[in-house]
């Protein structure tokens, strides 16, 4: 836990401005005040009255890079997001509803995914979407899967229950509705390590998109559902493991810091896939059998913002280094610009692409075969903006096994 | 997680030590809390004002013999050049750099393109070009220094459309924001044309050239046809940030791993040997050797209360002095010399006993006064190189 010297965390700020140096928005948009002013500086004023709240704060991506940069443990990103939750009078509209309700949209889309994918791929349709919803027409939507990951896992329940050791998997919306093969790769690796994979009794979207789009009450309800399932899993002695860095970060940190929901009792039991697997491989007596004939690939690892904030990029990096067929390059850690649903919004598109520009160039110059990252929205952004395909470290690991 | 060596810290000393170990073939992790004091750096590497032989016995430099000391200083410059940081000056002959308030301080290497006092003397006349609304650069102070040298100095200032926009948030009109604006080709061209209209052959700017690009200074010189030099601004230091980034890149390219945003919460010492450390992000690290490069008070490596100055992670032994403060503000302040004590191999002590695998380097060390001696960067780099050598020789 970070050090707390004062009841008001913002008072720990020494005004060194290091956070502003690393703010991806301040770097490209001179109209954004930057994290120091938007966070700790103005918080002092907001304590006096709500009229000091500035709509300018909605430019914040919630990437939390300011918090990683801060040498004084100020939770700058949390201060800004909490202020938005508390004071913003802007009401979310249809666009926010559609972007934030991943479960609802995903459930429908996976039923008719060929139609949805084909339609959203059409340029005229994207222009209509822009006209009606203010979602930028240049933004490419992630494809929906035909049928959900949960549906696929139902058929494998018996097979997975046969393993003596078990984990509970928090798959997240992306694996469930868009990329079930990533979930299957996770199951493959865990099975190879002697673990069966089961799902939580009830899993809702972690709520990250609800929080950033202004649906805080709904986010709180979903958080309670998830925490109930996680507690049940914990009572059964199961670790809860997630492949998505942002889901993990939301469950572990944002629930408490932004939604003010107590999760101390389960926080340590929620783990990230790469960390769980790396620890098993290095602490335990389990081993993975790598395929000696696996083709050699050059992988460039991109550190997603919330992965950086959790402090766990080292696990992905070290895990990838363990794979004999992988040559790894670590890209300089920086934001890709999409920040979940932020980059979908028409007014943010230019900022989003300007932020990612340096990363896109670094990726092209790296000469890699694949980019790897733990975050699904970074994947969408990088695949849309570069020539490279993006794989989750777990997918690369699964592909390299015998 | 297991590494050969774990370095606690993310500043100049930690990075130099990490680079030396990583290129020596070790598997190294660097655990950094936030960004480092390189963000407050001048752009020059100081070594020592005066003579090394006159230093006290507990000074970190006294643990290094003269030949090694010289070799380490050369290694320091070599590391910078590997990182793509070009410097002027030499180990054998010191020169002086100009501080943001117009002072002159001794050093052995200065970032290429920055003004040194020795070079300033060779100019007959210069234009000192400030930026409107940029409050972290004081042309009047610098002009006075130049005038004292007999250099004819003209003061002027400029603004560009983007710097005018930045002034809407006056407190955020900082060096990095200006440097980012000057990374853009249209702004480089606009500034070059302003510079070319200056009447003198030499133009001096605040050190805000090239944040993402490395060619801004050369481009401005070519486009304007003038000699351009820069002088350090108040923090954040553009040159310092670029240096930190470049050193991080080299460290990572040699296979090192950086854990960013981690505060080390506790260390486990058994039988005078560090077994493991645990960070604020629930990461436990084990290693053969550990290096304490946590900095002094500002970096958080040292803590102080009414009774004593302590080391913040392991509580290893520190120099103590009952007289911590001198009433004369500009005199040598005794507290500056407080810090971690080590044996001759830079290993720390716990209740007088050597901790076999815990080394210390950089500003966390006691026995030196970086401000009075002008030894801050030198101690950081030289002790880091010495610690790396000792670990590699184990």
Image: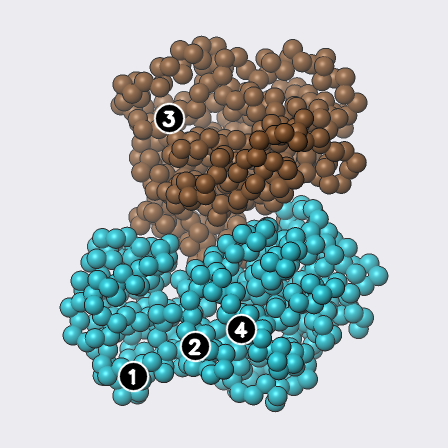
Q: Chain of mark 1?
A: B
Q: Who's cyan, chain-wise?
A: B
Can see residue A20? yes
Q: CA distance from mark 1 to mark 2?
A: 16 Å
Residue at 22%, 53% (x, y): give it. Answer: B186
Image chain in brown: A
Viewer-nearest of labels 1 and 3? Answer: 1
SS label for mark 4: helix
Q: How many marks?
A: 4
Q: Nearer the viewer, mark 1 or mark 4?
A: 4
**Is residue A131 placed above or below B217 in the rendered structure?**
above
The residue that disc 3 covers is A140
Tell me how far mark 1 sits from mark 3, CA to CA.
59 Å
Q: Which residue is mark 2?
A: B89
Crowding around mark 1 (Cα neighbors within 10 Å: few <14, some 14 to 19, many 20+) is few
Going from the N terminus, do you reach mark 1 or mark 4 first?
Answer: 4
Q: Is residue B280 left or right of residue B242?
A: right
Residue B190 location (% of width, % of height): 20, 58
């Amino acid at each position: 836990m970070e050090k707390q010297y004062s009841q008001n965390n913002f008072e720990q700020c020494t005004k060194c401005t290091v956070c502003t140096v690393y703010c991806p928005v301040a770097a490209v948009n001179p109209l954004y005040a930057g994290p120091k002013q938007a966070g700790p500086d103005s918080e002092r004023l907001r304590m006096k009255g709500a009229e000091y709240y500035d709509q300018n704060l909605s430019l914040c991506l919630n990437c939390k890079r300011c918090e990683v940069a801060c040498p004084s443990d100020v939770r700058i990103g949390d201060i800004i997001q909490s202020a938005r939750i508390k004071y913003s009078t802007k009401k979310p509209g249809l666009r926010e509803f559609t972007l934030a309700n991943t479960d609802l949209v995903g459930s429908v889309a996976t039923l008719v995914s060929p139609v949805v994918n084909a339609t959203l791929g059409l340029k005229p349709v994207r222009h209509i979407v822009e006209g009606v919803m203010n979602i930028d027409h240049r933004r490419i939507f992630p494809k929906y899967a035909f049928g959900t990951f949960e549906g696929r896992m139902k058929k494998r329940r018996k097979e997975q229950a046969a393993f003596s050791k078990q984990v509970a998997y928090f798959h997240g919306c992306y694996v469930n509705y868009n990329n079930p093969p990533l979930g299957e790769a996770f199951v493959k690796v865990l099975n190879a390590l002697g673990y069966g994979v089961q799902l939580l009794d009830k899993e809702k979207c972690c709520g990250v998109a609800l929080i950033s789009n202004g649906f805080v009450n709904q986010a709180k309800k979903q958080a309670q559902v998830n925490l109930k399932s996680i507690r049940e899993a914990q009572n059964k002695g199961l670790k809860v493991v997630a492949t998505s860095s942002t889901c993990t970060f939301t469950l572990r940190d944002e629930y408490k810091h932004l939604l003010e929901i107590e999760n101390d009792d389960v926080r340590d039991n929620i783990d990230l896939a790469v960390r769980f697997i790396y620890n098993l491989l290095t602490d335990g007596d389990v081993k993975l059998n790598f395929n000696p004939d696996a083709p050699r690939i050059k992988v460039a690892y991109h550190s997603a913002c919330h992965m950086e904030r959790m402090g766990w990029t080292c696990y992905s990096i070290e895990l990838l280094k363990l794979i004999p067929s992988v040559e790894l390059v670590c890209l300089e850690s920086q934001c890709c610009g999409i920040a979940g649903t932020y980059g979908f919004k028409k007014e943010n598109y230019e900022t989003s692409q300007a932020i990612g520009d340096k990363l896109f160039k670094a990726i092209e110059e790296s000469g890699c075969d694949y980019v790897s990252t733990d975050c699904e929205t970074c994947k969408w952004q990088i695949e849309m903006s570069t020539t490279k395909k993006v794989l989750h470290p777990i997918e690369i690991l699964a592909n390299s096994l015998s | 997680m297991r590494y050969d060596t774990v370095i606690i810290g993310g500043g100049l000393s930690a990075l130099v030590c990490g680079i030396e170990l990583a290129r020596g073939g070790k598997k190294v992790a660097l655990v950094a809390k936030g960004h480092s004091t390189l963000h407050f750096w001048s752009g020059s590497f100081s070594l020592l004002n005066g003579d090394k032989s006159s230093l006290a016995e507990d000074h970190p430099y006294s643990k290094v013999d003269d030949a090694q000391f010289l070799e380490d200083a050369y290694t320091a410059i070599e590391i910078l050049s590997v990182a793509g940081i070009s410097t002027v000056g030499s180990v054998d002959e010191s020169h002086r750099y100009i501080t943001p308030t117009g002072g002159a301080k001794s050093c052995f290497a200065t970032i290429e393109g920055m003004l040194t006092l020795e070079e300033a003397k060779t100019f007959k006349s210069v234009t000192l070009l400030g930026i409107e609304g940029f409050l972290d650069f004081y042309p009047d102070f610098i002009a006075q220094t130049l005038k004292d040298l007999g250099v004819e100095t003209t003061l002027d200032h400029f603004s560009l459309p983007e710097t005018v926009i930045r002034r809407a948030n006056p407190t955020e009109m900082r060096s990095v924001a200006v440097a980012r604006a000057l990374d853009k080709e249209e702004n480089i061209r606009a500034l070059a044309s302003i510079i070319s209209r200056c009447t003198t052959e030499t133009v001096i700017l605040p050190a805000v050239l090239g944040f993402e690009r490395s060619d801004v200074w050369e481009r401005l010189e070519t486009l304007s046809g003038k000699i351009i030099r820069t002088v350090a601004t108040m923090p954040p230091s553009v040159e310092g940030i670029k240096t930190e980034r470049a050193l991080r890149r080299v460290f990572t390219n040699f296979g090192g791993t950086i854990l960013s945003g981690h505060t080390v919460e506790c260390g486990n010492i058994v039988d005078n040997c560090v077994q493991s450390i645990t960070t604020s992000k629930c990461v436990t690290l084990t290693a053969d050797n550990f290096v304490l490069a946590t900095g002094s008070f500002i970096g958080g490596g040292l803590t102080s209360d009414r009774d004593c100055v302590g080391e913040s992670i392991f509580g290893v032994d520190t120099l103590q002095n009952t007289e911590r403060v001198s009433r004369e503000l500009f005199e040598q302040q005794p507290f500056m010399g407080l810090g971690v004590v080590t044996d001759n191999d830079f290993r720390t002590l716990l209740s007088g006993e050597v901790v076999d695998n815990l080394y210390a380097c950089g500003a966390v060390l006691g026995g030196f006064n970086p401000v009075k001696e002008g030894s801050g960067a030198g101690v950081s780099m030289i002790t880091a190189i010495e610690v790396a050598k000792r670990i590699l020789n184990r």
